[in-house]
Amino acid sequence: MEIETILPELVLAAAATVSLFLSSRKALWLGVGGLTAAIVLVTLSWGEEISGGFLIRDNFSWFFNLIFLGSALLVLLASRLDLILREREYPALIIFSTIGMTLLSSSNDLVSIMLSLELTSIPLYVMAGLGRDKKSAEASLKYALLGILASAVLIFGMVFVFGFTGETALPKIAQAVSKAEVNPGLIAGLFLMIGGFGFKIAALPFHMWAPDVYEGAPTEVTTFLSTASKAAGLAVLVRILSAFEAPVWLDWGMVLAILSALGMTIGNLVAIHQTNIKRMLAYSGIAHTGYILIGVASLGMDGAALSNTIFYIVAFALSDMASFLSVIAISSNIGSDDIADYAGIARHSPLVALVISLGLISLAGIPLTAGFLAKLYIFTGALDSGLSWLVIVAIINTVISAYYYFKVIKVMWFDEPLKVNRVTVSFLLGLALLVSSAGILVMGIAPSLIMNALGQISLPF
Amino acid sequence: MSGEVVYLVFALPILSFIIILAFLRPLFKGRPKVSSYLGIALTGISFVLSLLLLLGVYSGKDLAASPLLWLNLGNVDIKFGAIIDGLVAIMLVVVTFISLLVQIYSVGYMRGDPAYHRYFALVSLFTGSMVGLVMASNLFWLFAFWELVGLCSYLLIGFWFDRPAAANAAKKAFIVTRVGDFGLLGAVILLFTQTGTLDIGSLHILATSGALAGSVLSWATIGILMGAMGKSAQFPLHVWLPDAMEGPTPVSALIHAATMVAAGVFLIARMYPLFEYSPNLKIVAIVGGFTAIFAATMALVMNDIKKVLAYSTISQLGYMFLGLGMGGVSVGIFHLFNHAFFKALLFLGAGSVGHATNTFDMRQMGGLGKKMPWTFACFVIASLSLAGIYPLSGFWSKDEIISSASEEPVLFYMALVTVFFTAFYMFRVVFMTFSGSYRGEKEHLHESHKEMVIPMVILAVLSVFSGFFNLNGGFAHLLGETDVETMGIFEVLSHPAAIISLLVALLGIFLAYAVYKKQWLSAAGLTRVFYPFYTLFSKKYWIDTFYEDILVRRFLVNGVFEFFSLFDRYVIDGLVNGAAKAATGVFVFFNYFDHYVVDGLVNGIGGAAKSVGKSLRHLETGQLQLYGAFIVLGIVVIVMTIFIVEVLV
């Protein structure tokens, strides 16, 4: 294996390790520098395909690496100064977790998948507890315990797969699976693994940790969880599923379609009742996992499904990023996450209100935003795959979801302000807000920019 | 001149929106008028260009605009393109022209409003979006702009969002029209999946050639009709429009009278070949005919001048649907064209009156004719035109609709009764507002500023003459219809339908004169005699109450949503709790087993097991276990289902 296969990770690991010995501010800047350097390296590698041992670096993994690195960079920029000053390890934790994700999306073997998944998750468990209050500690503990359970389930599944194919490398598993007859062991193995990853991406019914952890963790960490971490889980899920594509007797598409329908419906209906914006966004995230699973479910049937799914992941990550980052800005100023306390924010802080509204509008899927096209692509793709019942469920859900997104917008723009705390935004947070909202609009107006790149992504088996 | 000019018509108002929002609003805080001048100038250019396009189309020039590729969806390219034909050119002229006049009027009307910049930015955005909707060559774009004008409408209805009524009205408009848009979106998706194209021209060809037919065509037209009914406030989706009057009055004139609400009529006209080859054209006529008379009855009893006009708009839009359904594109669109002028004028007149008296309640008005002569004259002209009095513009288009409806006796009589109601309620407004003596409390009433009066005068001239455009079938030719009956300016009076409707309208005016001017009949007495009807009309047939109280509050909020919330709380949580209870039972059982059996046998090991059982019981009370149990339960259910389905069956 050539050293440049993992050059971005080496740079990141060096930056993270050195940052542990520096003061908080220097650590932050070193982290930002390391992430930027990694982004440059990854961008330069676009189109190259390096494969060696446990890892494969193809356009699929490069693209996902950009999503993780970009999210990590935005989250780091947007983090509150007091959090960074208090927790010197915070930048290093984010970066270590990001390294885990970049390796995860490049893994070509069950062993490396498991290892990089743990590298991704363990820093996240710690980060969830950085709020240093009771809620945050509870979130951290819950996340860690359930995460370990999910890992156990995942390993259990991997053991089944290994046991029945005798292989851990994905290409060889794919070969073995394509020749296999109806095999209960492989069925159990695959669905145990889907369960394990379902936890990571907060898909129903493995979603129950999400609202509690999202609410309790510091919002920066929540942002990272709902964007990068979810994208990482989806990336590895897609890669594993593509190895199980061949056998007709293994109809994972239908299972994912049902999970998708459940996730959308329950997520949206429960979100309506939430009064805390972070919990609301958590349920909205569960619903969006459902929408993304529509694309994943049609992977085997529709050629465009892969690029549609990734487009949706990017659009969701940007929209959720814009919403959560605005929540950071607003909540640190008014000291509350209650939607009711957002009343009249737009009156004195119209720009932040505009960004969060844009994020929510995009999540709701209104035209001219990334979210609309993402839905359009995924829905049309699913129709081509014959999943019209799922599209109908999804459209009804889209209508329902507009209700609670617009409720927040209404509260911010039309209700009487309760407090007159002007929301002040630091330069770096402002920059992150600008980047994410510009991304939403650019993707919504000129999707071909990103679609062309997505067209160059394919999976090896 | 090439057809690409149409992109400029679209881009200029959008440019105005961007400049106002990005530069003028932050930089020219103290000088709000800059925004209005920019908006007026750019819309003015748009209007001139639209006029040139209309003349080009009229003179038969080939004005195709080559489309720009926007995105590629599977095997299909979605292009941002424009159609240029008579229908589009007429709509462009109407939209840009009314927008221009409304903006000029707003300079006076909105004077001193703290959100002046925002107002003009939104009006510009609306104008651009409406142009985009009209010219779109592709249903995808049409739908995108359809939503965008809806958004502008929402933002402008809620323009004074610190008033709860305005915020609620905005929400109501948004939600009610969404019901219709749901149908339209369904139709768009259906057409796309069945034909693989969203290009309007191609869809026309597919429909006329019979390639698109049967249930697909039928459902698609139903979906399109639903969208049109939502946007054009047809029964039963009409409830949002009267509430939308909470927006600034010039906005009511532009969006909720002349242009956006007519988008539904336009959409049906645009997709007319699809309707022609489907069985649903009759439904369009029935919806329109019913809404026309239904809304007119409510206009009879409203005391708010803008509410009367709002119901009148719903009723007239119903006429247009009736015209489309019975007569054809030119019959419906001609009424749209004339209606745009006189209804915009009525709203601007109402705005002028409201501006002077600070109220829209007609019971607080009266005797304004002498104080506001220009407004009075313009309002009377528009009312006569709306009532359909010869030779004003309303007469011509209404006559075409009524004579086309004569094939269906029921619709014909409904249309005639509507004519009577229309004449009565309009002149009820005229007499209550302008004659008699002033009943309000404001002193020093005076005529409005000249920038408000001039647009009204221009519209008054058009309300008189715009009907003549179709004298020799010119309007219909422009819409591509060749075999039209031509009517001269005098020979129309020998037409029986025309004479009957004219007489009915005069009767309505006379009745209003008798009740509200001369008071030969007392209004209170009429109310007493027709008390059941009066209650029915003034309570709006209890439809709003039904929607808000029963459908939304009882059924959706307290029913469906509550059900799911309870379902989540009791059934799902209950299942999990039950599973946990069962687990506890097992632990307890082992605990006892342990205590009495194992304990008795091996005391030491028993002690250890007891403490494990105890700690497990402690853990069971936390939610964490439930979550973990749920994860495992989920996987078990999935794997078992697959086993059963794939392996055993």
Image: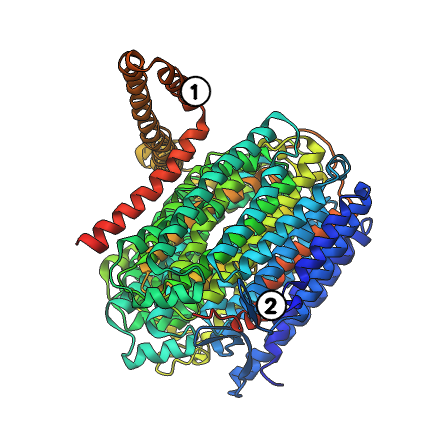
B167 relative to A254, above or below: above
Q: Can residue B428 be spotted in the picture? A: no
Residue B381 percent location from the top left of the image: 53, 57
How many C-alpha atoms fall within 10 Å of the one at disc 1: few (<14), some, or many (≥20)? few
B67 relative to A451, above or below: below
Image point (73%, 59%), residue name = A36
Classify residue A191 as left or right of residue B351. left
The numbered mark at residue A330 is: none
How many C-alpha atoms fall within 10 Å of the one at disc 2: few (<14), some, or many (≥20)? few
- Image quadrant where one finds the C terminus of chain A: bottom left
Residue A446 percent location from the top left of the image: 59, 68
Q: Chain of mark 1?
A: B
Discs 2, 1 touching: Cβ within 8 Å: no
| Image quadrant in which you'd find residue A62 | bottom right
- Residue at disc 1, secondary structure: helix
Of residues B567 and B176, which is closer to you in this image? B567
Q: Chain of mark 2?
A: A
Q: Nearer the viewer, mark 2 or mark 1?
A: 2
In the image, what residue type sits under mark 1? Ser
Image point (37%, 18%), residue name = B605
Q: Can residue A193 be spotted in the picture? A: yes
Classify residue A344 as left or right of residue A24. left
In the image, what residue type sits under mark 2? Met
Looking at the image, how many numbered discs can be counted on the residues?
A: 2
* Mark 2 to mark 1 CA distance (whole Å): 49 Å
The numbered mark at residue A1 is: 2
- The residue that disc 1 covers is B615
Residue A65 percent location from the top left of the image: 60, 60
